[in-house]
Image: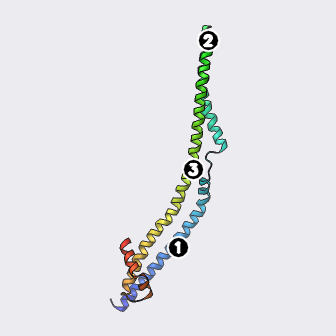
C-alpha cells in the first residue's frame, strides 16, 4: 500500500472511530437519562411492602365475606327446615358442625390471604430487580457492540499503519488482533 493510501485509510478509520465514540457517548447519555427517570419507580418496586393496608383489608373482607356467605346460607336452610317440620332434632348438632367448618374455612382463607400478600410483595420486588437488569442490560449490550466495532476499527488502523512502531500499533497490536478475531 502506498504511503498516501495508508494515510487515507488511517484518517478514514480514525473518523469512523470518532463517530462511533460520539454515538456511544450519546447513547450512554440517553441511557443515563432513562435510568434517572426509571429509578424512582424501580426503587418503589424494590422497597414495596406489597398490597397497601387498605388493599389487604379489602381483600380480607371480600374473602372472608365469601366464605361466610356459604355457611350463612346453610344455617338458614337448616332453620327453615326446623320451622317447616317443627322438629328441632339435630339442629344444634348441625349448627355446631357448620360453625366448626366455617372456622376452618375462615382460617384457611386467612392463611391463603397471608400467602397472597407475601407473594405480591415478592413479585413486586422481583419486578424491580428485572427492571434494574433490563435498565443496565441496555448498557451491557451497548458495551458489547462497542467492543466489537472499535476492535475491528483498531485492527484496520493497525493494518493501515503497516505494523509500524507507532504508539497505537505497539499499544493495541496483539490485543486488537485477538479482539478482532473474537468479535469479528
Q: Residue at x 54, y 56 (%)?
A: 129
Q: In terms of image quadrants, where is residue 110? A: top right
Point out the tag, 3 or 1, that comes first from the N-terminus: 1
167 relative to 90, above or below: below
Q: Residue at x 58, y 28 (%)?
A: 104
Residue 145 spot, x, y in % from top left: 44, 69
Asked whether residue 184 is in view, the answer is no
Q: Which residue corresponds to mark 2?
A: 82
Q: Nearer the viewer, residue 181 or 160?
A: 181
Residue at disc 1, secondary structure = helix
User: Where does the C terminus fall, quadrant-wise?
Assistant: bottom left
Instruction: Tell which tag, 2 or 1, sits nearer the viewer.
Output: 2
Point out the tag, 2 or 1, that comes first from the N-terminus: 1
18 relative to 129, above or below: below
Q: Residue at x 60, y 56 (%)?
A: 41
Q: Which residue corresponds to mark 1?
A: 25
Asked whether residue 49 is in view, the answer is yes
Q: How many marks?
A: 3
Residue 37 spot, x, y in % from top left: 60, 61
Residue 71 spot, x, y in % from top left: 60, 24
Drawn side of residue 163 relative to residue 34, left or right: left
Q: Nearer the viewer, residue 32 or 89?
A: 89
Residue at disc 2, secondary structure = helix
Amino acid at each position: 500500500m502506498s504511503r498516501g493510501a495508508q494515510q487515507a485509510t488511517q484518517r478514514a478509520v480514525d473518523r469512523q472511530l470518532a463517530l462511533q465514540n460520539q454515538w456511544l457517548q450519546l447513547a450512554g447519555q440517553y441511557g443515563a437519562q432513562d435510568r434517572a427517570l426509571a429509578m424512582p419507580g424501580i426503587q418503589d418496586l424494590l422497597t414495596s411492602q406489597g398490597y397497601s393496608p387498605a388493599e389487604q383489608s379489602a381483600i380480607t373482607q371480600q374473602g372472608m365475606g365469601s366464605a361466610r356467605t356459604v355457611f350463612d346460607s346453610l344455617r338458614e336452610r337448616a332453620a327453615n327446615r326446623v320451622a317447616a317440620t317443627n322438629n328441632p332434632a339435630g339442629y344444634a348438632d348441625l349448627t355446631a358442625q357448620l360453625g366448626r367448618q366455617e372456622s376452618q374455612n375462615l382460617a384457611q382463607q386467612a392463611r391463603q390471604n397471608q400467602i397472597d400478600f407475601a407473594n405480591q410483595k415478592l413479585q413486586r420486588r422481583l419486578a424491580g430487580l428485572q427492571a434494574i437488569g433490563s435498565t443496565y442490560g441496555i448498557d451491557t449490550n451497548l458495551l458489547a457492540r462497542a467492543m466489537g466495532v472499535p476492535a475491528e476499527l483498531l485492527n484496520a488502523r493497525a493494518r493501515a499503519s503497516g505494523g509500524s512502531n507507532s504508539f497505537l500499533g505497539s499499544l493495541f497490536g496483539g490485543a486488537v488482533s485477538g479482539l478482532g478475531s473474537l468479535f469479528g
